[in-house]
Image (cartoon, rainbow, N blue to C red):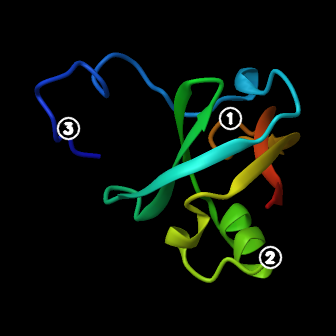
Amino acid sequence: MEKENLDSWDGFLGSNYLKVEDLKNDNPFICIGVELDTENKRPVLVLEKDMNTYKFSLNVTNSNYLKSNGISTPKMTIGKKIFFGKIMVTNPQTKKMQESLRITKIE
């Protein structure tokens, strides 16, 4: 994604993408925006929880979950509460099992 603002270090110092370790409790994340990852051609949710901001790139599975639960466009996630669960998946590069995130509920 492009770095659009040179008036701040935000976006330049490491990744603020949501990780499994960020699921410390069952409280939902609030979607405060949606961006387009032009490199991977995926919507990216901008989430907020406990005064921290995270990004979550939607894969096909999570996109299908949202669509099947009444979210007809990525922008419709803005303002919604999003709950995540930990799952085990096979990493396509290493062929090893690893923890990942799956959307489990949206309100």
The structure residue drawn at horizontal position 39% and vertical position 18%, both measured from the top left corner, is: 14
> Quick check: 52 left or right of 24?
left
The structure residue drawn at horizontal position 55% and vertical position 24%, both measured from the top left corner, is: 52
Q: Amino acid at mark 2?
A: Asn
Secondary structure of the residue carrying tag 2 is: loop
The structure residue drawn at horizontal position 62% and vertical position 59%, both measured from the top left corner, is: 59
CB-based contact (under 8 Å), mark 1 and mark 3: no
* Camera-side mark, 1 or 2: 2
Disc 3: which residue: 3
* Camera-side mark, 2 or 3: 2
- Marks 1 and 3 sit apart, C-alpha to C-alpha, by 30 Å
- Marks 1 and 2 sit apart, C-alpha to C-alpha, by 32 Å
Who comes first in sequence, dot 1 or dot 2?
A: 2
Query: Residue 78's mark?
Result: none
Q: Residues within 10 Å of mark 3 (few under 14, many from 20)?
A: few
Q: Amino acid at mark 3?
A: Lys
Disc 2: which residue: 69
Query: Residue 94's mark?
Result: 1
* Camera-side mark, 1 or 3: 3
Secondary structure of the residue carrying tag 1 is: loop
* Quadrant in which residue 88 is drawn: top right
Relative to residue 45, is residue 48 depicted above or below?
above
Who comes first in sequence, dot 1 or dot 3?
A: 3
Relative to residue 59, is residue 32 depicted above or below?
above
The structure residue drawn at horizontal position 81% and vertical position 33%, both measured from the top left corner, is: 99
Where, quadrant-wise, is the C terminus in this rendering? Answer: bottom right
Q: Amino acid at mark 1?
A: Thr
